Image (cartoon, rainbow, N blue to C red):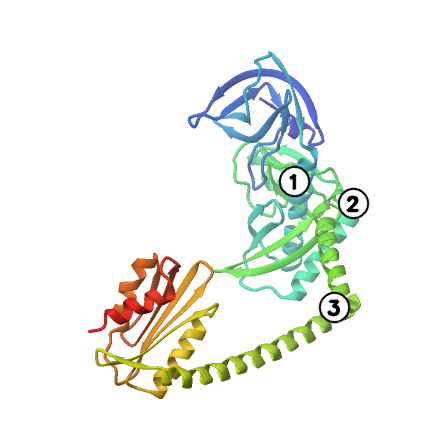
Amino acid sequence: MKKLYYEDSYIQSFSTKLLKQQEDENGHTYVVLGETAFYPTGGGQPFDTGQIDGVDVINVEEVDNEIRHYINRPLEGKAEVSGVINWERRFDHMQQHAGQHILSAAFAELFDMETIGFHLGNETLTIDLNVEELTEEVVREAEKLANQIILENRPIETKWITLEEVTQYPLRKKPTVTEDIRLVIIPEFDYNGCGGTHPSSTGQVSSIKILDWERQKKKVRLGFICGNRVLKHFYQKHQVLSKLTQQLNAPEQDMELAVGRLLDKNKELEKLLEESTDRLLHLETDLLLNQSSIINQHQIVGQVYEGRTIQQLQKQARILVSKKEELNVFLISENENQIQIVCSRGKEAAVNMKALVANILPLINGKGGGNETQAQGGGEKILSGEEIVQRIVNSLN
């Protein structure tokens, strides 16, 4: 099969013979063509999409030395067909892949950092560097050199060589194949074995922006974007920032300070709310203690609330049993279609709270845990809070 994407990565449409149309072992229809401009998945670069005679190409793979074009419905079976590449997707992949070459070469040139992994995703792409740490300064210098190479608009050349010819080129790493070796070359900067598609010059990559990086075991994974993705990313960030300047009534250059003040104010409000909640819980504690009752020689408090968190129930229970050590506490919160339970006992009480909760949870399709002193859980509101309290009380011996 003739691979037109290697002859000219800018070919967007072509006509050729239909050699085969059939289904694979999973029942998916594919066609094999006499020649193709559709790039199959490989070398870290995703496949091309587009159409063949108006039928959508949804995947392209190289299997058993043939390129399979998977389509969403069968072709009519004509001898000659026409293919059209989704050019926006293809050129994006060309920009990203070439940008990866440039950035990897920049890290190697400046800091002798080898790229040991590469992934081209729908939104961002990543490289894995054979280092355990990266600094802001190193990242900034590599990004600066990469964009300088782009600005110089150097040619990007491709060349087929044999294994014997490999030693004639300063390759960044050894090729993974032993024959039909394809080099992608940025003269006097990067020489790399690669089977992907690339633009004809570095200037067409437009720009590179590093977004983030993180340590993963003994390497660093670095995320970045190139070309039109940089413009898209900038537009999205600008839209968010513009809305924030309006909402916070602060200019763009003061946004960090404005957000900082807002976060500090929020922390103050959260602290005040927590203090108010604690005061409320202590006030309620006195009321609940006055309403406690003796059932089967067990002193109990049972209460149903609406819209409380399980953390609030747990705090309420701790306050109650700390004030009366012979007390058994059963607190329920109803939250829309969910229900939460906290059961707790004081030091002088003997009811097994873990067993009580374990008996209730199956009735509400719930999950939970704890120990004999305090247990909790939650589930569906199949029973009301009052029904659950009553079932617990009735189970006391």
> Which numbered circle lies on residue 271?
none
Q: Look at the numbered disc 2 and give the secondary structure of its residue.
A: loop
Report if the CB atoms under discs 1 and 3 are less than 8 Å apart: no
Label 3: state its secondary structure: helix
Considering only order in the chain, which callout, 2 or 3, is on the residue closer to the N terminus?
Answer: 2
Q: Which residue is mark 2?
A: 153
In the displayed structure, does residue 389 sit left or right of residue 54?
left
User: Callout 1, which amino acid?
Assistant: His
The Cα atoms of the two marked residues, 1 and 3, are separated by 38 Å
| Residue linked to disc 3 | 248
Closer to the camera, 388 or 226?
A: 388
Please report the residue visible at 28 percent of the width from the left and 69 percent of the height from the top: 392
On the image, the x and y values in percent for residue 191 come to 65, 44
* Residue at x 25% of width, y 82% of height: 349
Query: Disc 3 residue type?
Result: Leu
The Cα atoms of the two marked residues, 3 and 2, are separated by: 42 Å
Most extreme residue toward the bottom is 323
Residue 109 lies left or right of residue 361; in this view the side is: right
Task: State the image quarter where residue 326 is shown.
Answer: bottom left
State the image coordinates of residue 131 (x, y, percent, origin top left): 55, 60
Query: x%, y% of residue 61?
Result: 53, 31
Identify the residue position indicated by label 1 in the image. 93
Q: Mark 1 or 3 closer to N-term?
A: 1
Compare residues 324 and 243 and report the one nearer the observer: 324
Cα distance in 3D space between marks 1 and 2: 18 Å
Tell me the residue at 37%/68% (across/down).
341
Q: Determine whether the residue tagged by mark 1 lies in a helix, strand or loop.
A: helix
Front: mark 3 or 2: 3
Q: Where on the picture, by quarter, is residue 159?
A: top right
The quarter of the picture where the C terminus appears is bottom left
